[in-house]
Image (spheres, grey):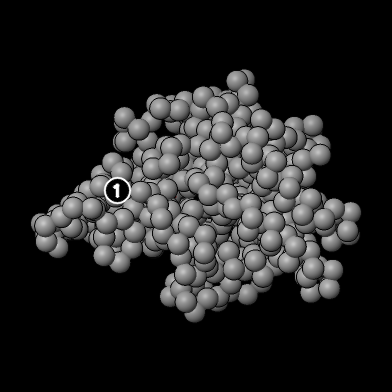
Amino acid sequence: MNLMKLSALELGKKIQSGEVSVMEAVCDAMEAINAKEEALHCFITVDEAYAKKRAEQVQNSIKNGELKSLLAGVPMAVKDNLCTKGMRTTCGSKMLEHFIPSYTAEAVQKLEQAGAVLLGKTNMDEFAMGSTSETSYFGGTKNPWNQNHVAGGSSGGSCAAVAANECCYALGSDTGGSIRLPGAFCGVTGIKPTYGTVSRYGLVAYASSMDQVGPVAKDVSDCAAVLEIISSFDKKDSTSIQRPALDFTSALIDNVEGMKIGIPISCFDSELDSEVHNAVLTAAERLKERGAIVREFDLGLMDYAVPAYYMIACAEAGSNLARFDGVKYGYRTEAYEGLHQMYKKSRSEGFGTEVKRRLLLGAFVLSEGYYEDYYLKALRTKACIQNEFKRVFSQFDVLLSPASFSVAPKADSSLDNPLKMYQSDQYTVSANLTGLPAMCLPAGTNQNGLPIGLQLIGNRFEEKKMIRTAYTLEQAMRRKGEKNHVKTV
Ligand code: GLN
């Protein structure tokens, strides 16, 4: 039996009760990884020896009664931009191909304290820049539902690994939709919490004002359970927020009686695939049946979200990635004359095309003469979008929309046209510009058998309302026999 087909909480219960050992779970995960990795390439690094050693430790702690978490002993994976002490952390880049961190990211550490067993590090777009996972230096991840299609990005490895039952759950990061877009394409559930909820300590920065770590899992309950563990106030992250009531699993309530759900009609433009459109309408009906008041409304400024996001993200990336200069971290060119040539050659050879494009754009929008026309204008646009969402959340509890305008595109079809790829983030980036919590959840498949993803957005600090809505939808779909079975490749 492949125990990875179970949800994390189901497997965790079996481990706590002694029905299954942690080693059995790890062996099953390794078997699945060995069978599928060649075709899918979800992982950049798999560390079987580490996982087995860790399985023994965790098993002992469970036996002694020291570890009581329902996630103790459950095998999981972590996106390769989260530092793991002693395990290489590449960010999908040649620049960090051999980088071994000396410390572990706070979110990963929280999970380890709860007894998580790390299997390895998942594939991603280089430095989390991309929407397909194809910009990885190590080669792209394939979609487990159909390998001719992309897994989505940038947390494509984490989402595909969960969808393909190579692990029970995973961590991803979301700066502009990188959990929600691949989550939608792979038919899994993922959450980007309110900015500041999960520590960014040990997350390799892309655009610090928007980066958040979040869970990717097989269902809403697993996501809530993982989020509950990784959320914390952390002095090591200056944007970390002290917030009460992080008991997200208490929101797993199958009822949305009286809740006000808004659907932004601007998302129903001509670009939107008709099957995705129908999935949103069906979800709205399900929520109405469960007592919600669902209404369409006009969300302004949405045309400006993608341009503002890319200006800000590239500007911050330009500053964050300046540290990769061949001196302190990662790759250094072999032959050079003088310091300047060393910088230049190390960066030219260490970064891929998409990263360079963003760094150039970032340098441009911050440069004298353009700063005000581009970067400041983007910041002002962001403030206007924030105000617009404030207005909207005075009327609604949760927003429902598609996560993407289509299902997963074919592999090798996106990179030639970067602007078109940027546009694919149109539904997701607003939540990052505003810092609001958002999540994706599966809503069946299209006629070609590819998953369709919904998005829910909540008000600041109101993950619980969002989780409750997602859980109600998930339960309704299950009752209708629409359970989105995770694909076994
Ligand atoms: N696709 C977006 C980008 O390339 C989002 C990336 C992310 O969330 N890390 O910037």
Q: Quadrant where the C terminus lies?
A: top right
Front position in the image: 7 or 48? 48
- Name the side, left or right, on which 67 lies relative to 358: right
x 39%, y 43%: residue = 137
Q: List x then y, in percent, for residue 10.
A: 80, 51
Please give the count of numbered marks on the rendered protein: 1
Q: Which one is nearer the viewer's eye here, 152 or 286? A: 152
Q: Quadrant of residue 208?
A: bottom left
Residue 187 lies in quadrant: top right
The type of residue carrying mark 1 is Phe
Q: Quadrant of residue 465?
A: bottom right
Circle 1 SS class: loop
35 versus 400 height, above or below:
above
User: From the viewer's perspective, is 236 left or right of 260?
Assistant: left
What residue do we see at 79% from left, 33% from top?
480
* Residue named by callout 1: 351
The residue sitting at 61% across, 65% down in the picture is: 230
Is residue 23 rendered to the left or right of residue 320?
right
Ligand 1 within 8 A of label 1's CB?
no
Q: Is residue 159 visible?
A: yes
x and y, in percent, of residue 69 in the image = 76, 66
Side of 402 where 346 appears, left or right: left
The x, y position of residue 98, in whole percent, is 41, 55
- Residue in front for this viewpoint, 478 or 381: 478
